[in-house]
Image (cartoon, rainbow, N blue to C red):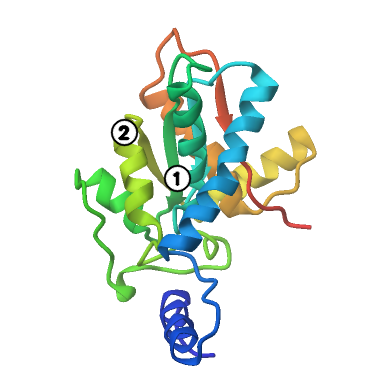
Amino acid sequence: APGTYEELVDLSAKEAGEQGWYNGNPGTEENSKVSFEAYETIAYEIFDELEYAPDAVSVSVSNGTCFRGVFKGFRKMFRQGKTDKIPVMIAASTTGGNPILSSFNDGRKKIENLSPDAITETPENEPIVSWKSLDGQQALDALWESDGYACAVSDAIMIAFSHLLEKEEGLSVLPASAASVAAMAEYVKARATPKDKCFVSVLTSRKY
């Protein structure tokens, strides 16, 4: 069907409502709640491996669903007394455009969508470029609550980190996923302190 991803989500949601179908799109209250709970388990897995909360966690963002879920998992463990802190949450996305990053870096507490004409989609950034992030407000809230950091990554840098991960770690990940590692590297240079010891980048997709 013609149209952008965001336009097709709106169209399919409209059709689902009119036809009585289940609307499985992101961004609805019911679906977001379930998705956040599912992605919380990433935080639990990280904690199980480390036995503590890392200083910072980086996640590539498009709609912001996974990002919010990971944050919620760490926040829940902190509130339960299992960890001594909530990690700094790092949102990685593309220089092609993403409203979570632009809203946060402009100092806004309320998500502001971009114009569809303001984004530049490429084969490399397609998984994370967005003019409307469907769980963007929740992701933006997580950035502010965790004293977070947001970093836009160019295609060239994404590709370079994707190749680096394959060469050094044997991991075949999409460039858009490798953006989380690139953003972490920028965070370490910009904000990390000598007391920070542990940094985790979540890799969310693979090439093959």
**Where is 104 relative to 76, above or below?**
below
Q: Which residue is mark 1?
A: 68
**Where is 52 relative to 124, above or below?**
above
**Which picture quadrant has residue 95?**
bottom left
Q: Identify which residue is drawn at 47% across, 89% down.
A: 15
Q: Quadrant of the N terminus?
A: bottom right
**Where is 5 relative to 80, above or below?**
below
Residue 62 visible at all: no
In depth, the one of 201 and 123 nearer the eye is: 201
Mark 1 is surrounded, within 10 Å at the Cα level, by few (under 14), some (14 to 19) or many (20 or more) other residues, namely: many
Give the amino acid type for the residue marked by disc 1 in the picture.
Arg
In depth, the one of 100 and 161 nearer the eye is: 100
Distance CA(mark 1)–CA(mark 2): 11 Å
Q: Which residue is mark 2?
A: 145
Q: Identify which residue is drawn at 69% across, 23% down.
A: 49
Question: Residue 104, which numbered label?
Answer: none
Measuring from the top left, give residue 98's x and y in whole percent.
37, 58
The reply to whether the C-beta atoms of the residues labelled 1 and 2 are less than 8 Å apart is no
Instruction: State which tag comes first along the sequence, 1 or 2.
Output: 1
Q: Is residue 13 left or right of residue 99?
A: right
**Where is 134 relative to 94, above or below?**
below
Mark 2 is surrounded, within 10 Å at the Cα level, by few (under 14), some (14 to 19) or many (20 or more) other residues, namely: some
Measuring from the top left, give residue 8's x and y in whole percent.
47, 82
Q: Is residue 32 left or right of residue 48?
A: left
Return the residue found at the far front: 20
Secondary structure at badge 2 equals helix
Give the amino acid type for the residue marked by disc 2 in the picture.
Glu
Q: Identify which residue is drawn at 50% across, 62% down.
A: 31
- What count of labels does the image hold? 2
Q: Quadrant of the C terminus?
A: bottom right
Measuring from the top left, give residue 172's x and y in whole percent.
75, 48
Measuring from the top left, give residue 150's x and y in whole percent.
37, 41
